[in-house]
Image: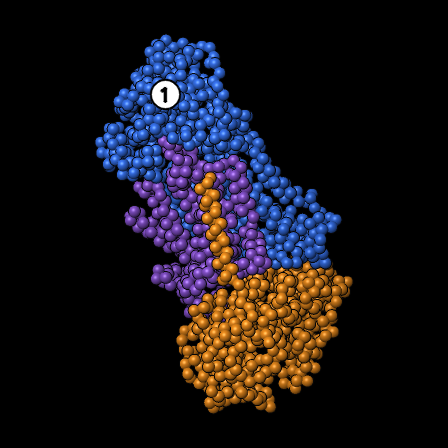
Chain colours: A purple, B orange, C blue
């Protein structure tokens, strides 16, 4: 297990370096006069040149990247070109919000999709059809429509939850819960729709396995077979799906953070990328790729614990 | 199936728990007088450095810095860090006498050398509003309390500038650091920035300063929250999570007024205009001919624009002067009435009976579909084939205002309450609105007179200049837009004359 | 997988035409196909459906209600909503198709080659795919927008690249399993060039899953395109698209919510249709008879009294045996063309201490008979008629709970394929002890001790060590011993063994058979031995039944039936065995693993 972790971590690091390199080079390709953009049209040329030099933009791209990498390895992503804020600090300040959403959504999705998936996979028939149709609806309804309706009904009309903003968990757990509930619900609907179908397939697949029949032939109660053997064997593929959804949530977070006015990574990504703020884009990309690699690693470890066969490799 | 229904029950119970927790936490506080102010805006401050101040971000700075001169809501000027000020006879030297007993956070007293250091730094800093210092030739600190600003020529907007970005005074003790005020301000203002509750780019939190030299701040806490859409702001206003905001989108204005108890005040402040850069006809020869520019003005049906795009919340106009400026001439609003026949005649007269091609950049946030299509249809009707280049914000700014790839742009213009601000912002050579330095004898003559004359004379000449610009069709002004100031009932916000954003001082708890 | 678990389907590999027919019988499949066809047709026929052009704007009409010639009214710029919807469909579907095309072109060939050739190409491709899969799509789209601009077409190409791994993985996985199939081997041996093999044999196998994946990815691309334009990240310029329409609608959601309604409906309906189509395709291609109610088994009515058996040799069934007695049993499965009977009118008896062989080729219904007796028919299977008594108790119509309590303690099951019949996630010890605890209420320690004893009883030398092993860590023969130990764990009086040696090595087969015989003798168990191997029957059984097409065609003492087969079919079986040395015949069976044709 230790060797496995070590190998995967090394591969993950290599991946991050490769991705960051490609992105960095690509981002540096377009000829943007950053200094001019920053200082305005009326600034004298020497000032602009000085600004570009101060940002290190007068050096070759490879040198710039090497410099970036050496700092990034120490978790220093430099300063935003446009707002001068420290990118690492800025990301750190926004990370808890997006993370709250993603963990919340993953928890809700895991519970709900396992419930629905197992139910429809075992019962089949009408229940199965109903869950499938609900799944398709949840999948097909545009996420922003669902989110807008949720805000209007539960925040603006009924006033059960705040419509905007975020309260840190450390400040007030109840406040945190109230601010993340609606965004989590909004994001979960689509995620549950997708994941419950996957859980259902996995359950149906396991149910058709020979060993399930053999276990039943030995007189084990149906409940034991379902909750011990079916669930355990179905959870490995389901976990893979949940892991991939966790990664995909970042996209949904962009939208939900905008609508709920949450200062998270998603809204940050939109705001800074449209301005072409390379230090921020690189920082965000690195942090998210690290997140993805970590999640994949965790999923693999979890699958290894659940499924002894995969431990060999 | 029984076990699964148990899970469902659990999930339901969890949901209820969440809901009740939320209810106890989410109830908006009401009753007692407002002690905290939360402003929703779409404009973020770039940093806490006065060099980066200006425009819609000025309230962020007014919280922690004081300006030399204070600007009242009606545009009149009152003492702040400067107790008094006088011009010399030639109006080229402004003497400011500073207030005594004002101290920075580190205990150093505010003196003339500190003010000089700030004014010099602003002039050299190359910020967005560096134009406010354009006429300043030099600054002298003649004694501890006296600063003299020497000008290259009369500048009727200088005092206003000193109540804006140019007048912000920061602690010079930090000037020699790298990016001294990137996120930590250091000024003499009525509030302190609460850094722990601040996320740059999203939320700024200020708390009342303990030992402010002047009248203590109106609120214990001020929070400015940035959003990227007004929909979220209106939702926040309706749930009481935001106390005040200025709404630009007419649809959101409707949302804020329908079925709510919010206080609203409308202000006609920004102008939607087609700014023609290429008045020399370098790129598109036709635009060099005033008759063609007049034809464009005649071709557009402004009343429909106001009715449909602004839903009536605005006024069609043919002048760039705002209603609060003395140079405003009411009848010029309707100088160019919709008259396609006349437009065609003018085009024919200018030798463009067959029309011409025109490509303009478009930023969807500035030119919504409705406006883009209306302009294309109206211009198309007289033979001008308009094509829009849809651009990204950064590309838009670069290619439009830096590289001048296009002969003009449809944009929003401010409508200052000072004639000189309009002139120096939109007419003088090398300004954003006049990048190629167009001018003529009339303009030169009138601007010189306005610059040096008495207020009454200046107003008269400004009106003449206004008319001249309209007749020459330098611009294609479209309509003035109504913005809506919205506050919760427990709060009042007085609009700022000539500015879309109220000064921070204009917010008060309701009596 | 055991051979005749699937009730002899009429089609072995779903061909295109049958799949299409099945799709058309699924109402959701028909509906989604119709919706998609309608959307595509509407997009193509836009000029025929409306006289208006999507770019014609009359601000005067902005937000105008529907009127003649403009059935959906006008948008914020005074453009005809219907025409924008129709022409917008072209661009929207085009964008999704673009992403899809990129994903397919990148993903499928690389997947085919990586799966077929493996080695270095596979390693490189896999590395690249892992790289792509580690990229958070939205961040990448935003970053590429910073480089390449907001043009939505460029973003769709990027999306296509990001979606390519899903095709790659799918195709590679299938090709890996197909690569070593006999017919592919045969093609390779016969000297066909690789590209012919891939295009002729391999591509056909991956066709169905690809179609499903295409529908899913198209749905995702459609939704994402709309989403990108909605949040203003992507832009399609002056071309109308549904995403741009949604974006516009959002800006006027207070004044005219209907501006959002139509494009929202279009996006929702189209992506819903794509997902439903994928689901229906999956059902059709994977031959899932979902249309039928599932839990009929539970509701099966008590069997009517057994009718008198028909004439012939099978009519000579003796009086009902005390241990197991089956009369006129029939088992059926739902199919698209009505119920299919896979076991018809079968009667048999097993007395204590007796070994009865049940022989027949695959699909003859012998395994289904065994499952029916055990009450573990696969989903959809039901006992139509007949009577089954175990120790005199009628089990058909018995409650699940009562029936279950008979298993292990009275009747036990030894399956065919040892490896697939052990739960891979639990240790051998756990799997042995669990039913013991469940059936006898023994403590964990006692159940464990009993499990060790049992392992010893089936000749496993180091039982403590094996207890800690997982199924994948032991050999097939060992696994079969474990399964036999599990079967006898609660001292059953009847053992039903379904081809217990078929999947094993030849050397192990004899050992397992010897073990079964020893246990049967020691414990005096009755055994119903399901097999296709007459050698085994000759070796072990007291009497034998021969099944064909669900019916018992011949029965009698082993010596009788093997020496004087009366039925042509039996004769054929016997002759086949006599022609070949026994060992070779079993060798073949072991090599192919299953007896599937």
Depth order, front residue of C403/B58: C403
The x and y percentages for residue B222 are 51, 72
Asked if residue A178 is positioned above or below residue A122 in the image, the reply reads below
Residue B392 or residue A100, whichever sits in front? A100
Quadrant of the rendered image containing residue B378: bottom right
User: Mark 1: few, some, or many residues within 10 Å (few <14, many ≥20)?
Assistant: many
Left or right of B206? Residue B466 is right
Q: Quadrant of the C terminus of chain A?
A: top left
Callout 1: helix, strand or loop? loop
Residue B407: x %, y % from top left: 62, 65
Q: Residue at x 68, y 59 (%)?
A: B374
Q: Residue at x 63, y 60 (%)?
A: B368
Residue at position x 47%, y 18% from top?
A: C306
Tell me which corner region of the image, top left, top right, bottom left or bottom right, holds residue C443.
top left
Q: Nearer the viewer, residue C520 or B333?
A: C520
| Residue A188 seen in the current view | yes
Quick one: A169 or A144, which is closer to the camera?
A: A169
- The x, y position of residue C72, in whole percent, is 69, 49
**Percent x, y of residue B427:** 63, 75
Q: Chain of mark 1?
A: C
Report the residue at 33% width, 39% height from top: C426
Q: Which residue is mark 1?
A: C323
Numbered-mark total: 1
Q: Is residue A14 visible?
A: no
């Amino acid at each position: 297990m230790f060797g496995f972790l070590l190998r995967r971590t090394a591969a993950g690091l290599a991946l991050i370096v490769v991705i960051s390199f490609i992105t960095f080079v690509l981002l540096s390709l377009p000829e943007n006069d950053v200094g001019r953009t920053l200082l305005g049209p009326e600034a004298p040329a020497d000032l602009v040149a000085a600004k570009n030099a101060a940002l290190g933009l007068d050096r070759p791209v490879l040198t710039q990247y090497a410099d970036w990498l050496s700092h990034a390895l120490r978790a220093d992503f430099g300063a935003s070109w446009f707002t001068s804020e420290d990118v690492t600090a800025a990301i750190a300040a926004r990370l808890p919000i997006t993370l709250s959403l993603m963990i919340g959504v993953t928890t809700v999705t895991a519970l709900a999709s396992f419930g629905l998936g197992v139910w429809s996979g075992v019962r089949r028939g009408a229940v199965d059809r109903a869950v499938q149709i609900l799944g398709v609806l949840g999948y097909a309804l545009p996420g922003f429509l669902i989110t807008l309706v949720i805000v209007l009904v539960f925040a603006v009309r009924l006033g059960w939850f705040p419509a905007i903003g975020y309260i840190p968990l450390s400040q007030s757990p109840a406040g945190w819960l109230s601010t993340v509930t609606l965004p989590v619900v909004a994001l979960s609907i689509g995620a549950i729709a997708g994941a419950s179908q996957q859980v259902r397939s996995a359950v149906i697949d396991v149910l058709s396995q020979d060993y399930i029949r053999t276990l039943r032939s030995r007189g084990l109660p149906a409940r034991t077979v379902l909750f011990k053997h079916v669930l355990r064997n179905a959870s490995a593929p389901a976990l893979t799906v949940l892991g991939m959804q966790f990664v995909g949530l970042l996209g949904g977070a962009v939208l939900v953070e905008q609508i709920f006015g949450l200062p998270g990574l998603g809204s940050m990504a939109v705001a800074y990328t449209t301005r072409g703020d390379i230090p921020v884009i690189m920082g965000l990309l690195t942090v998210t790729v690290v997140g993805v690699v970590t999640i994949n690693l965790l999923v693999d470890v979890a699958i290894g614990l659940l499924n002894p066969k995969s431990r060999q490799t | 199936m029984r076990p699964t229904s148990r899970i469902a029950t659990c999930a339901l119970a969890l949901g209820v728990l969440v809901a009740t927790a939320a209810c106890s936490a989410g109830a908006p506080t009401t009753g007692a007088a407002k002690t905290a102010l939360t402003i929703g805006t779409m404009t973020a401050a770039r940093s806490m450095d006065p060099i980066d101040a200006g425009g819609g971000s000025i309230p962020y700075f007014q919280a922690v810095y004081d300006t030399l001169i204070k600007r009242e809501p009606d545009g009149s000027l009152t003492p702040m860090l400067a107790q008094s000020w006088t011009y010399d006879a030639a109006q080229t030297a402004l003497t400011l006498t500073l207030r005594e007993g004002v101290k920075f956070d580190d205990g150093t007293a505010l003196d003339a050398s500190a003010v000089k250091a700030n004014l010099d730094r602003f002039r050299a800093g190359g910020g967005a509003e560096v134009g406010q210092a354009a006429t300043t030739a030099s600054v002298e600190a003649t004694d501890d309390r006296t600063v003299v600003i020497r000008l290259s020529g009369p500048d009727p907007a200088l005092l206003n500038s000193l109540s804006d970005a140019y007048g912000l005074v920061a602690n010079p003790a930090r000037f020699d650091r790298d990016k001294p005020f990137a996120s930590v301000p250091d000024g003499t203002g009525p509030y302190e920035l609460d850094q722990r509750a601040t996320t740059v780019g999203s939320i700024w939190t200020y708390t009342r300063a303990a030992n402010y030299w002047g009248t203590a701040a109106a609120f214990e806490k001020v929070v400015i929250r940035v959003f990227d859409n007004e929909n979220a702001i209106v939702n926040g206003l309706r749930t009481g999570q935001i106390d005040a905001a200025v709404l630009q989108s007419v649809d959101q204005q409707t949302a804020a007024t329908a079925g709510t108890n919010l206080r609203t005040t409308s202000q006609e402040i920004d102008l939607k205009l087609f700014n023609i850069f290429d008045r020399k006809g370098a790129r598109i020869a036709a635009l060099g001919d005033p008759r063609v520019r007049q034809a464009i003005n005649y071709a557009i049906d402004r009343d429909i624009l106001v009715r449909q795009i602004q839903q009536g919340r605005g006024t069609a106009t043919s002048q760039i002067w705002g209603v609060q400026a003395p140079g405003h001439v009411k009848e010029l609003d309707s100088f160019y009435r919709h008259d396609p026949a006349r437009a065609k005649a003018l085009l024919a007269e200018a030798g463009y009976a067959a029309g011409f091609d025109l490509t303009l950049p478009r930023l969807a946030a500035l030119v919504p579909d409705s406006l883009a299509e209306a302009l294309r249809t109206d211009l198309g009707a007289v033979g001008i084939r308009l094509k829009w280049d849809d651009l990204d914000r950064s590309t838009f700014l670069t290619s439009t205002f830096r590289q001048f790839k296009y002969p003009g742009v449809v944009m929003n213009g401010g409508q200052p309450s000072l004639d000189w601000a309009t002139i120096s912002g939109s007419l003088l050579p090398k300004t954003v609105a006049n990048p190629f330095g167009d001018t003529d004898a009339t303009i030169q003559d009138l601007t010189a007179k306005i610059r040096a004359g008495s207020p009454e004379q200046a107003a008269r000449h400004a009106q003449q200049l206004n008319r001249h610009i309209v007749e020459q069709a330098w611009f294609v002004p479209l309509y003035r837009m109504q913005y809506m100031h919205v506050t919760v009932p427990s709060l009042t916000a007085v609009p700022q004359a000539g500015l879309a954003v109220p000064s921070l001082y204009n917010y008060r708890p309701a009596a | 997988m055991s051979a005749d678990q699937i009730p002899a389907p009429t089609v072995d590999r779903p061909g295109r035409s049958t799949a299409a027919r099945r799709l058309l019988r699924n109402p959701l499949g028909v509906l989604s196909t119709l919706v998609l066809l309608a959307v595509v047709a509407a997009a193509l026929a836009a000029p025929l459906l409306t006289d208006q052009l999507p770019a014609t704007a009359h601000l005067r009409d902005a937000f105008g209600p529907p009127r003649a010639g403009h059935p959906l009214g006008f948008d914020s710029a005074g453009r005809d909503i219907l025409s924008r919807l129709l022409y917008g469909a072209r661009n929207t579907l085009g964008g999704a198709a673009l992403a899809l095309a990129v994903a397919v072109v990148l993903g499928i060939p690389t997947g085919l080659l990586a799966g077929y050739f493996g080695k270095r190409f596979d390693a490189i491709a896999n590395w690249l795919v892992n790289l792509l899969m580690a990229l958070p799509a939205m961040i990448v789209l935003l970053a590429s927008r910073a480089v390449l601009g907001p043009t939505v077409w460029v973003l769709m190409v990027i999306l296509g690249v990001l979606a390519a791994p899903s095709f790659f993985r799918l195709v590679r996985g299938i090709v890996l399993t197909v690569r070593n199939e006999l017919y592919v081997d045969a093609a390779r041996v016969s000297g066909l060039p690789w590209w012919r093999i891939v295009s002729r044999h391999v591509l056909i196998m991956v066709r169905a899953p690809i179609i499903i994946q295409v529908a899913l990815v198209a749905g995702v691309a459609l939704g994402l395109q709309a989403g990108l334009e909605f949040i203003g990240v992507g832009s399609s310029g002056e071309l109308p698209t549904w995403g741009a329409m949604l974006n516009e609608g959002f800006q006027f959601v207070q004044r005219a919510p209907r501006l959002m309604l139509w494009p929202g409906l279009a996006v929702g309906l189209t992506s819903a249709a794509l997902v439903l189509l994928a689901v229906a395709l999956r059902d059709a291609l994977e031959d899932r008879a979902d249309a039928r109610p599932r839990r009929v088994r539970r509701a099966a009515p008590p069997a009517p009294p057994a009718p008198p058996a028909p004439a012939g040799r099978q009519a000579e069934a003796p009086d009902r045996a005390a241990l197991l007695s089956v009369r006129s049993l029939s088992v059926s499965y739902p199919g698209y063309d009505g119920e299919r009977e896979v076991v018809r009118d079968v009667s048999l008896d097993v007395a204590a201490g007796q070994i009865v062989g049940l022989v027949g080729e695959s699909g003859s219904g012998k395994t289904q008979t065994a499952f029916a007796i055990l009450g573990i028919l696969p989903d959809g299977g039901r006992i139509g008629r007949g009577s089954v008594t175990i120790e005199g108790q009628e089990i058909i119509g018995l409650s699940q709970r009562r029936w279950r309590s008979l298993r292990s303690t009275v009747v036990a099951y030894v399956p065919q394929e040892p490896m697939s019949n052990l739960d891979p996630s639990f240790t051998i010890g756990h799997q042995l002890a669990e039913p013991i605890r469940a059936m006898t209420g023994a403590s964990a320690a006692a159940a464990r001790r009993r499990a060790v004893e049992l392992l010893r009883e089936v000749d496993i030398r180091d039982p403590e060590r094996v207890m800690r092993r997982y199924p994948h860590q032991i050999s097939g023969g060992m696994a079969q011993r474990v399964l036999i130990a599990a079967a006898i764990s609660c001292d059953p009086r009847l053992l039903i063994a379904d081809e217990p040696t078929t999947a094993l090595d030849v050397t192990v087969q004899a050992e397992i058979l010897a073990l079964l015989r020893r246990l049967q003798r020691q414990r005096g168990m009755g055994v119903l031995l399901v097999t296709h191997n007459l050698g085994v029957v000759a070796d072990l059984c007291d009497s034998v039944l021969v099944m064909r097409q669900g019916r018992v065609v011949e029965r009698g003492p082993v010596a009788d039936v093997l020496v004087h087969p009366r039925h042509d079919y039996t004769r054929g079986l016997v002759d086949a065995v006599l022609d070949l040395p026994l060992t070779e015949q079993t060798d073949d069976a072991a090599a192919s693993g299953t007896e599937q044709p």
